[in-house]
Image (tube, grey):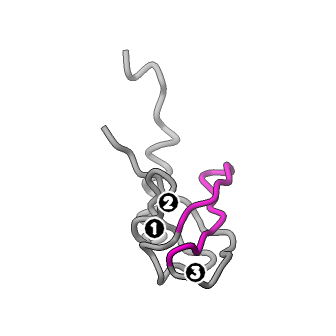
């Protein structure tokens, strides 16, 4: 199973469309993601990230709703 996680773009680095990256915050954990698939992404936007690539820009309400669902997840739910 694959899982993409929403995160908020904190800043963007680079002008080349293929190597442009952004620092993305996932509920306080900050990682760098490639923005090649989301040229429209801007600082403050929410993006859906899988395997280090932002796949799409999300509506803020939908992103926050998904993050709220993930916050409810308990690891013991897998047992």
Q: Quadrant of the C terminus?
A: top left
Left or right: residue 58 compared with residue 27: left
In the image as oriented, which residue stretches furthest toward the top? 79
**Which residue position is annotated with label 2?**
64
Label 2 – label 3 distance at C-alpha: 17 Å
**Viewer-proximal residue, 26 or 14?**
14
**Viewer-proximal residue, 21 or 59?**
21
**Viewer-proximal residue, 20 or 63?**
20
- Magenta-colored segment: predominant secondary structure: strand
Q: Earlier in the sequence, mark 2 or mark 3?
A: 3
Q: Quadrant of the N terminus?
A: top left
**Stretch in magenta:** 18-34
| Mark 1 secondary-structure assignment | helix
> What is the quadrant of residue 3 in the picture?
top left
Q: Are marks 1 and 3 in contact (CB under 8 Å)?
A: no
- Tell me where residue 61 appears, x and y as whole percent: 45, 67
Left or right: residue 63 compared with residue 21: left
> Residue 25 lies in magenta, yes or no?
yes
**Which residue position is annotated with label 3?**
42
**Which residue position is annotated with label 1?**
61
Q: Residue sitting at 68 percent across and 54 percent down?
A: 30
| Mark 3 secondary-structure assignment | loop
Q: Mark 1, mark 3: which one is toward the viewer? A: 3
């Amino acid at each position: 199973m694959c899982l993409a996680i929403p995160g908020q773009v904190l800043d963007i680095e680079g002008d080349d469309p293929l190597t442009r990256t952004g620092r993305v915050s996932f509920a306080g954990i900050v990682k760098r993601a490639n923005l090649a698939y989301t040229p429209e992404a801007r600082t403050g936007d929410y993006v859906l990230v899988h395997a280090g690539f932002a796949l799409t820009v999300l509506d803020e309400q939908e992103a926050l709703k998904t993050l709220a669902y993930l916050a409810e997840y308990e690891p013991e739910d897998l047992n």
